[in-house]
Image: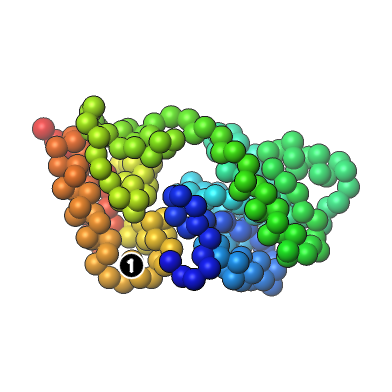
Amino acid sequence: MPYGAISDKNGPVRVLVAEDDPGLRAVVRRGLDEAGYVVDAVSDGEEALSYLATYEYEVVVLDWRMPGVSGIDVVAELRRRESTVPVLMLTARDLPSDRVQGLDSGADDYLVKPFDFGELLARLRALRRRPAPVQRGELQVGDVTLDPTTLQVTAGDAPVPVTRTELRILELLMRRAPATVSRSSIAIHAWQEEADAVGSNTIDVHIARLRSKLARAGVRIETVRGVGYRLSTARR
């Protein structure tokens, strides 16, 4: 992990930034990167929802006014999906009624533009200090179960020992099953430095280890040549 990177017990802290102003998006991304966060930055709400459906984030920074799908639309859809990820809303709208609308839509905090970057960092730290809500529902494919709350993997009643990186890969494959997950998506989800994983055999090594550990668990990780991997129920 690079010097100064922010992490918690589950690894580097990832944040999604959705902001349609390219200048402000670049400034926020660079500032968060320098502060130690691992940042994905997108320019509109539709792309934000796509990222949020694919990857796990510790916090999300949303611009209110984005073309098409607005920040309000994004946070409302997140809450409909029962996502509990903390959301900080950025907006130039500073009337009390605007703040009420943003918070009632599901945002956790609200910052008016123009803002001091130090205050943005402080608000993100405050959101991360809040107790994490209990995540609902275990993931299950075949005989394999992954509990997002305890981060435990079992095959039937037997525990499956996995490393932190293997856990992240398996969680993504289970959440997307039976769809194919690209190598790039796996790299973004499981490693801080995506290019290092994509451009080497690192992913292949971890997939091979997972296959070995899940060999008798009623599932298999299939290789989709030129694309990535998918998790399916093994034929008996």
Residue depicted at 79% across the width and 62% down the height: 115
Location of the N terminus by quadrant is bottom left
199 left or right of 89 in image: left
Residue depicted at 19% across the width and 54% down the height: 208
Q: Nearer the viewer, residue 6 or 111?
A: 6
In this rendering, the answer to whether 187 lies above or below 46 is below
Image coordinates for residue 62, horizontal then vertical, percent: 66, 53
Secondary element at tag 1: helix
> As drawn, which residue projects farthest toward the top?
157
> As drawn, which residue projects farthest toward the right?
95
| Disc 1: CA contacts within 10 A as few (<14), some (14-19) or many (>=20) | some
Res 116 visible: yes
Q: Nearer the viewer, residue 82 or 33?
A: 33
In this rendering, the answer to whether 157 lies above or below 25 is above
Res 173 visible: no
| Residue beneath disc 1 | 198
Q: Quadrant of residue 30?
A: bottom right
Image coordinates for residue 168, horizontal then vertical, percent: 37, 49
Location of the C terminus by quadrant is top left
Residue depicted at 55% across the width and 65% down the height: 36
| Colour scheme employed for the rendering of this structure | rainbow
Image coordinates for residue 135, horizontal then vertical, percent: 49, 34
Residue depicted at 66% across the width and 53% down the height: 124
97 left or right of 30 in image: right
**Residue type for callout 1:** Val
Q: Nearer the viewer, residue 140 or 66?
A: 140
In this rendering, the answer to whether 22 lies above or below 221 is below
Image coordinates for residue 169, horizontal then vertical, percent: 33, 51
